[in-house]
Image (cartoon, helix red, strand yellow):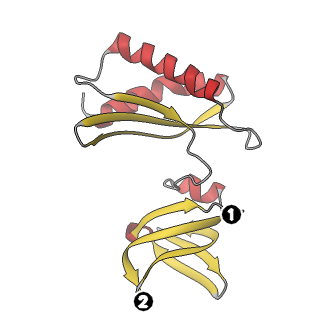
């Protein structure tokens, strides 16, 4: 199976378990880093007032591990990781931008604009591939394809 097929198979087969436990799939990735392959599953609570517990991660890990052992779709060794996306979660999907509109975000660009590659501001939305943030001086616009990362800012 190729990487895309592995992701689709795992996603399709864990959505029911997650939903039954008040959880949702935030993101999933299957990547090679150095000599190792990683299957990473990021889960979140449907109820935003609750946090992901170690027990949540453990139960999903056991379920996915058992499922993958039975189906054996991955031909080589890999490391399975299940975790929360964290408080500084990466915003990738359009739905992430919609859900976190109004939150403070940190944006990092591939190439600088006026010698600056990092920007922080309140997420004003995403429309037609353009990310809008409000900073102290107004609205800034960033083409999503030029953005290396957009994360929730950790504000104390």
Q: Give the residue number, with chain letter if any, for mark 2.
A: 114
The residue sitting at 56% across, 81% down in the picture is 140
Q: Quadrant of the N terminus?
A: top left
Q: Is residue 94 above or below residue 109?
A: above
Could you tell me if residue 128 is visible in this image? no
Q: Could you give the CA–CA distance between mark 1 and mark 2, rounded to whole angstroms?
A: 25 Å
**Label 2: few (<14), some or many (≥20) within 10 Å?**
few
The residue sitting at 24% across, 33% down in the picture is 2
User: Residue 120, position in %: x, y?
Assistant: 58, 73
Q: Residue furthest front?
A: 156
Q: Is residue 111 above or below residue 102?
A: below
Q: Answer left or right for 29 relative to 87.
A: left
Q: Nearer the viewer, residue 10 or 127?
A: 10
The residue sitting at 66% across, 31% down in the picture is 53
Q: Answer left or right for 50 relative to 20.
A: right
User: Residue 129, position in %: x, y?
Assistant: 46, 67
């Amino acid at each position: 199976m190729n990487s895309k097929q592995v992701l689709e198979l795992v996603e399709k087969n864990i959505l029911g378990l997650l939903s039954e436990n008040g959880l949702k799939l935030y993101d999933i990735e299957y990547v090679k880093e150095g000599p190792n392959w990683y299957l990473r599953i990021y889960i979140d609570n449907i109820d935003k007032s609750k946090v992901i517990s170690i027990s949540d991660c453990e139960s999903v890990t056991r379920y996915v591990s058992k499922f993958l052992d039975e189906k054996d779709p991955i031909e080589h060794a890999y490391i399975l990781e299940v975790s929360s996306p964290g408080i500084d979660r990466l915003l990738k999907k359009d739905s992430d931008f919609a859900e976190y509109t109004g939150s403070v975000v940190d944006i990092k660009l591939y190439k600088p604009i006026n010698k600056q590659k990092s920007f922080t501001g309140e997420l004003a939305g995403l429309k037609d591939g353009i990310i809008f943030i409000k900073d102290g001086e107004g609205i800034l616009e960033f083409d999503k394809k030029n953005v290396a990362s957009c994360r929730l800012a950790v504000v104390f």
